[in-house]
Image (cartoon, helix red, strand yellow):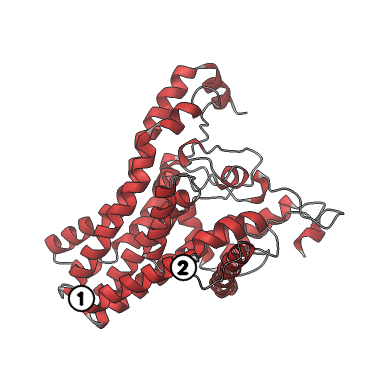
């Protein structure tokens, strides 16, 4: 425990004040939804509408990493006895995530109307689609929070949001596959030591899709049902995706179809890049009985940079999430024993795009983690 942690532990009033300030800081997570209209307005005001169409990736992967360094890190944990029960009961946090889903639907329809209006050149149209796709990728993070909950409205909202980016299988594979097999060779979402992003992505796309179908078919078989029955939730989610695609096509022709599919591809690719960096090179050790050791906070890379943490609803406190999957985002904790990334997720996504740079930065950290157990790297 650092001096700051000890000070906060002795000063509950200060801790509660900081938690209250952090509570409203999560409003920053709504910023991606506001960026496209703000950037469009700025582009129209300056006459650089095609340049500003590329503004979302510039803000998310350029400005936010810089602000992360300026604002610093946040290791504040709520007290389990006094803070957590109250924070879990506050509707504010739930309204934020459910509101995000509703706002994204509006943004998706509005952004396609803007694209169809002809305001952009070809380069601007590509930038606009990339920008909306990145917002959709951040939306998958919101869906990730929702599908882990017991409330059926939250899980349905999460599935619906995933259907809008054609990745409904994530709801099944993530819960029943990734959380069971994380940091083992059986997991499609855990990258290996020395594996490049471009080797990982094709495997992740295919294995996650197929694993979702296998898991859902096995669930239905145990209940005596066919995998192609109406009870297969994947059929519902992919049908919603097909319905959305059909609606975009009927309303805007080939442009609507291309936009919907392209923003979906960018969104779920961003998800898989984040998956790549969250568990890179970390393995659960195999025990003498042939089973893998229990998942602990040490099997996920964490990052404690404040801005990206509130921007992503505490996704960077990934170790606590894997140890306690149903914990709501507002009460996820920082663990000192968890391996730490050298920067926030926004910066590390950019680094991952350049495999030599990624290996130079990350491989020494993985090797230090397994010092004395180098056979684990094989």
Viewer-side residue, 271 vs 186 = 186
Instruction: Identify the image quadrant of the N terminus.
Output: top right
Q: Quadrant of residue 281?
A: bottom right
The disc at residue 206 is: none
- In the visual, does 282 lie left or right of 65? right
Image quarter of the C terminus: bottom right
> Residue 328's spot in the image, x, y percent?
48, 40
Indicate whether 108 appears above or below 18: below
What secondary structure is found at the residue carrying circle 1?
helix
The residue pinned by badge 1 equals 251
Measuring 25% from the left and 79% from the top, which residue is drawn there? 255
Q: Going by the image, does 1 lie left or right of 16? A: right
Q: Residue at x 53, y 64 (%)?
A: 352
Outermost residue, right direction?
Answer: 288
Percent across and percent down for residue 124 are 25, 73
Q: Residues within 10 Å of mark 1 (few under 14, many from 20)?
A: some
Residue 265: name its quadrant: bottom left
**Where does residue 91 sit, x and y in percent of width and height?**
36, 35
Q: Is residue 344 above or below residue 10?
A: below
Residue appearing at x 70%, y 60% in the figure: 184
Left/right of residue 344 with respect to residue 63 in the rendered view: right
Q: Which residue is mark 2?
A: 230
Is 328 placed above or below 62 here? above
């Amino acid at each position: 425990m650092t001096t700051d942690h000890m000070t906060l532990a002795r000063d509950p009033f200060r801790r509660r004040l900081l938690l209250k300030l952090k509570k409203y800081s999560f409003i920053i997570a709504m910023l991606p939804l506001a960026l496209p209209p703000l950037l469009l307005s700025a582009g129209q005001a300056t006459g650089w509408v095609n340049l500003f169409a590329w503004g979302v990736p510039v803000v998310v992967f350029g400005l936010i990493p810089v602000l992360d360094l300026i604002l610093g890190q946040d290791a504040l944990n709520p007290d389990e006895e006094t803070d957590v029960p109250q924070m879990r009961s506050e509707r504010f946090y739930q309204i934020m995530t459910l509101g995000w889903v509703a706002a994204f639907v509006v943004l998706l329809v509005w952004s396609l109307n803007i694209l169809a209006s002809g305001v952009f050149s070809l380069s601007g149209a590509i930038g606009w689609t990339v920008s909306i796709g990145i917002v959709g990728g951040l939306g998958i993070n919101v869906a990730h929070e929702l599908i882990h909950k017991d409330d059926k409205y939250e899980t349905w909202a999460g599935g619906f949001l995933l259907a809008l980016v054609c990745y409904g299988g994530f709801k099944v594979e993530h819960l029943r596959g990734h959380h069971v097999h994380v940091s083992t060779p059986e997991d499609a979402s855990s990258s290996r030591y020395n594996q490049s992003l471009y080797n990982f992505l094709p495997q992740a796309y295919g294995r996650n899709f197929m694993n979702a179908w296998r898991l859902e078919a096995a669930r239905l078989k145990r209940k005596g049902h066919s995998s192609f029955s109406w009870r297969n939730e994947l059929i519902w989610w992919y049908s919603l995706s097909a319905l959305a695609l059909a609606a975009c096509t009927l309303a805007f022709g080939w442009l609507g179809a291309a936009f919907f599919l392209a923003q979906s591809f960018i969104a779920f690719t961003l998800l898989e890049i984040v998956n790549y960096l969250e568990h890179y090179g970390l393995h659960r050790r195999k025990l003498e009985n042939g089973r893998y050791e229990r998942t602990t906070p040490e099997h996920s890379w964490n990052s404690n940079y404040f801005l990206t943490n509130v921007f992503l609803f505490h996704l960077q406190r990934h170790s606590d999430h894997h140890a306690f999957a149903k914990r709501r985002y507002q009460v996820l904790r920082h663990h000192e024993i968890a391996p730490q990334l050298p920067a926030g997720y926004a910066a590390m996504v950019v680094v991952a795009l350049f495999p030599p740079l990624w290996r130079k930065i990350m491989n020494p950290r993985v090797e230090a983690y397994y010092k004395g157990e180098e056979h684990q790297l094989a």
